[in-house]
Image (spheres, rainbow, N blue to C red):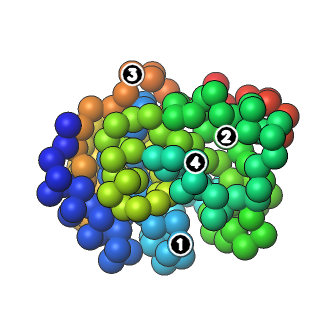
Amino acid sequence: MTDAPAYDRAVAALRRGGIVAYPTEAVYGLGCDPANAAAVARLLDLKQRPQSKGLILIAADEAALQPWLAPIDVTTEARIGPTWPGPTTWLLPTAADCPEFLRGEHETLAVRVTAHPIAAALCRAWGGALVSTSANRSGGEPVRDATSARELFGAGVDAVVEGAVGDLDRPTPIRDARTGRTLRE
């Protein structure tokens, strides 16, 4: 498990509008403060990812995602609840004030309550949800370790939380919470 100073460095970087790299269920992720438009723009630029695609938010618990989402009805909660915490990312309707720089051209936001111990601990240390996108250039293969993240992004990443990724072979599945349809296996 990662030591406390690593989380402290990552949280300090996030508070400065920085980008952090950390392990997730399948790959290394890049994250930033979802409320900081400049940090999100920097992250998208680093990945060479168009804003229109939208991003994923992760959290250690469902409550940390609520500011970004419309109220979740009982049927939807019954669908997503059994999968969290866990490696399933859900598309959920956004709150009216959820910024376009997070949701892209969609009326939903991709969110996950992560079960990865390091990613969840980082969210708890941060005190809320984080943008979480795979550590790769858009269209490229995501990296699976801290060394590769440092080599690929260099000074573009302000802090790295080291640790092993989970045992998934590919990034987490994405499902539409309104329909149950799987968009990414």
3D distance between C-alphas at marks 3 and 1? 30 Å
Q: Which residue is mark 1?
A: 35
**Residue at figure coordinates x 42%, y 31% from the top left:** 26
Q: Circle 2 is placed at which residue position?
A: 90
Distance from label 1 to label 4 (Cα)? 17 Å
Q: Which disc, if any, is residue 62?
A: 4
Q: Nearer the viewer, residue 18 or 139?
A: 18
Amino acid type of the residue tagged 2 in the rendering: Trp
Q: Is residue 184 above or below residue 50?
A: above
User: Are the residues flagged by discs 1 and 2 in contact, CB closer than 8 Å?
Assistant: no
Instruction: Identify the residue shown where x is 45% and y is 72%.
Output: 39
Name the kind of residue labelled 1 in the image: Ala
Question: Which is nearer the N-term, disc 1 or disc 2?
Answer: 1
Closer to the camera: disc 4 or disc 2?
A: 4
Q: Amino acid at mark 3?
A: Asp
Q: Is residue 143 visible?
A: no
How far apart are the alpha carbons under marks 4 and 3?
23 Å
* Image side of residue 154 versus residue 93, left or right: left
Element type where label 4 sits in the image = helix
Q: Residue at x 70, y 58 (%)?
A: 69
Q: How many marks?
A: 4
Q: Quadrant of residue 181?
A: top right
Q: Quadrant location of the C terminus?
A: top right
Residue bearing the label numbered 3: 167
Q: Amino acid at mark 4?
A: Glu
